[in-house]
Image (tube, helix red, strand yellow):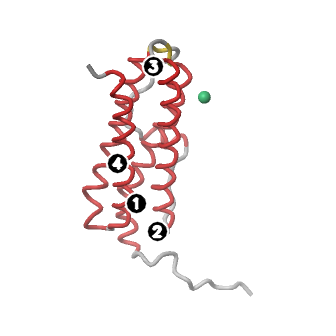
């Protein structure tokens, strides 16, 4: 006899879960894209401040992966799946295609800042919209926004006048 599990998936209502996922799913996509493109940048940066930029890009990648995990697991904790398959990420990201091959450090930094800004657009939208829907999911988005803002500053400081 098959045992029927009666424990609910989540205490959050399905409508709230779906609404939260609607704003967190794009966040996961953009952070996964940032992680992949950040590694590409880490491997191909050349020129001024090489070692600092090379290492900082790895920190940006680590944070992107960590934040993607936090956002994805919030959706899963609410009882819904997340689609972060490579084809989905490639199809849905709003980030521009990375230039192929080696790049000078200033160009690399501005490219990755632009990628962070694409991610911040969906993260900030999640912050703005989730307060009314699910404050716990909004808290996830706020934490990610704070972290991305800081990584953006660390990169920007290399190219600022
Ligand atoms: Fe490395």
Nearer-N-terminus badge (4/1): 1
Q: Is residue 6 above or below residue 64?
A: below
Residue 1 position, x and y percent, is 74, 87
The residue that disc 4 covers is 146
**Ligand 1: which quarter?**
top right
| Residue 99, numbered label | 3
Give me the C-alpha separation between circle 4 and circle 3.
Answer: 28 Å
Give me the C-alpha separation between circle 4 and circle 2.
Answer: 23 Å
Mark 4: C-beta under 8 Å from nearest atom of ligand 1: no
Nearer-N-terminus badge (4/2): 2
Give me the C-alpha separation between circle 2 and circle 1.
Answer: 8 Å
15 lies left or right of 89 = left
The residue that disc 2 covers is 78
Nearer-N-terminus badge (4/3): 3
Q: Mark 3 and mark 1 in contact (Cβ < 8 Å)?
A: no
Q: Mark 1 and mark 4 in contact (Cβ < 8 Å)?
A: no
- Label 1 environment density (alpha carbons within 10 Å; few <14, some 14–19, many ≥20): many
| Residue 21, numbered label | 1
Q: Mark 1 and mark 2 in contact (Cβ < 8 Å)?
A: yes
22 lies left or right of 73 = left
Give me the C-alpha separation between circle 1 and circle 3.
Answer: 31 Å
- Label 2 environment density (alpha carbons within 10 Å; few <14, some 14–19, many ≥20): many
Nearer-N-terminus badge (3/2): 2
Q: At 28% from the left edge and 51% from the top edge, which residue is drawn? A: 125
Give me the C-alpha separation between circle 3 and circle 2.
Answer: 38 Å
Q: Choose mark 4 or mark 3, whichever is in front.
A: 4
**Element type at marker 1?**
helix
Q: At 46% from the left edge and 49% from the top edge, which residue is drawn? A: 67
Residue 31 position, x and y percent, is 45, 43
């Amino acid at each position: 006899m098959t045992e029927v599990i009666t424990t609910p998936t989540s205490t959050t209502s399905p409508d709230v879960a779906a609404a939260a996922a609607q704003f967190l799913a794009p966040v996961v996509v953009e952070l996964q894209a940032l992680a992949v493109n950040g590694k590409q940048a880490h491997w191909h940066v050349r020129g001024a401040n090489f070692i600092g930029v090379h290492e900082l890009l790895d920190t940006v990648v680590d944070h992107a992966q960590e934040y993607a995990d936090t956002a994805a697991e919030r959706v899963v904790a609410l009882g819904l799946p997340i689609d972060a398959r490579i084809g989905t990420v490639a199809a849905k990201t709003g980030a521009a295609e990375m230039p192929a091959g080696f790049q000078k450090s200033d160009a690399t930094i501005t490219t990755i800042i632009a990628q962070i800004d694409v991610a911040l657009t969906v993260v900030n939208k999640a912050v703005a919209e989730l307060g009314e829907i699910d404050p716990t999911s909004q808290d996830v988005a706020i934490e990610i926004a704070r972290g991305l803002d800081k990584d953006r500053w660390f990169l920007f400081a290399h190219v600022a006048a």
